Amino acid sequence: MRPDLHGAVQSGLFAALSWRRFCDDTRTRIDACSCIMRTRDYERAMKGGTMSA
């Protein structure tokens, strides 16, 4: 692979990864609490418990 092409691929990959990490971090902060509660309710329901609000 040519060095300039390799550099372009690396920088593009880094940009994509850092953007994705930013999106994931933001989504995690927003959804963490509700996601954890949904997961626990779902697991409880799957075990035969009752769903809580």
Image (cartoon, rainbow, N blue to C red):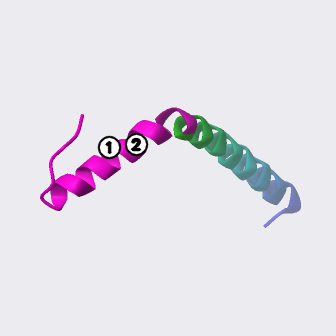
Numbered mark located on residue 35 in the image: 2
Q: Position of residue 31 (x, y in %)?
A: 47, 36
Residue at 80 percent across and 59 percent down: it is: 6
Residue 8: give its label: none
- CA–CA distance between discs 1 and 2? 5 Å
Whether residue 22 appears in magenta in the rendering, the answer is no
Principal secondary structure, stretch drawn in magenta:
helix
- Using the image, determine if residue 3 lies above or below residue 53: below
Which type of secondary structure does the marked residue at label 1 adopt?
A: helix
Give yes or no for contact between labels 1 and 2 (Cβ–Cβ under 8 Å): yes
Frontmost residue, 25 versus 6: 25
Q: Label 2's element? A: helix
Q: Is residue 42 above or below residue 31?
A: below
Q: Is residue 40 magenta?
A: yes
* Magenta-highlighted residues: 29-53
- For disc 2, the neighbor class at 10 Å (few under 14, some 14 to 19, many from 20) is few
- Tell which of 26 and 46 is nearer to you: 46
- Crowding at dot 1, Cα within 10 Å, few <14 / some 14-19 / many 20+, comes out as some
User: Which x, y percent locates residue 30?
Assistant: 52, 32
Q: Quadrant of residue 18?
A: top right
Residue 51 figure quarter = top left
**Can you identify the residue that label 1 sits on?**
38
User: Considering only vertical position in the picture, is 26 above or below 4?
Assistant: above
Q: Position of residue 33 (x, y in %)?
A: 46, 39
User: Would you say 39 lies left or right of 23 here?
Assistant: left
Image quarter (top left, top right, bottom left or bottom right) of the C terminus? top left
Q: Residue at x 83, y 55 (%)?
A: 7
User: For the residue marked with disc 1, what is the amino acid?
Assistant: Arg
Residue ranking furthest to the left: 48
Residue 20: % across, % down: 61, 43
**At 26% across and 57% down in the image, what residue appears?**
43
